[in-house]
Image: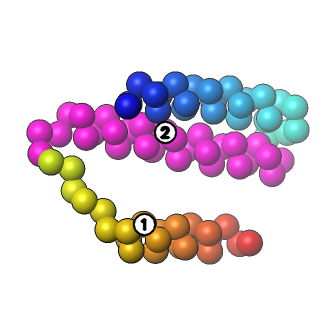
Amino acid sequence: MTRYVATIRRQLQEVFELFSTRYGSRSTVAEVAGRALVCTTLLEHEMLLLEQSPTEPEKVEREDLNRSAIVGTANRGE
């Protein structure tokens, strides 16, 4: 699974570079691509940690996920 996320991250890196070059690094589309790249990089890092960890991964409650999604949206200023 980590291998797939790494592939997605590399593709998003290319997309980010393309959008930054074509539309400018401060364009909305480049910023969104950059956020996607950051999220994928964080996901890849977490998956690597899980692979290295001998313990069982902690379970995340659905309520916690919903709360973090709401906070993420609120911080975008939309």
Over which residues does the magenta segment extend? 27-55
Q: Report the residue at 62% width, 27% height from top.
A: 11
Who comes first in sequence, dot 2 or dot 1?
Answer: 2
Residue holding disc 2: 41
Q: Report the residue at 63% width, 33% height from top.
A: 12
Judge from the rendering whether residue 58 lies leftward or rightward of residue 19; answer left or right: left
Q: Is residue 51 visible?
A: yes
Image quarter of the C terminus:
bottom right
Q: Residues within 10 Å of mark 1 (few under 14, many from 20)?
A: few
Q: Is residue 62 magenta?
A: no
Q: Is residue 26 visible?
A: no
Q: Is residue 37 magenta?
A: yes
Instruction: Locate residue 46, reporting x and y percent.
Output: 35, 43
Which amino acid is tagged 2? Thr
Tell me whether the residue at label 2 lies in contact with that at label 1, contact meaning CB atoms closer than 8 angstroms. Answer: no
Judge from the rendering whether residue 73 lies leftward or rightward of residue 16; answer left or right: left
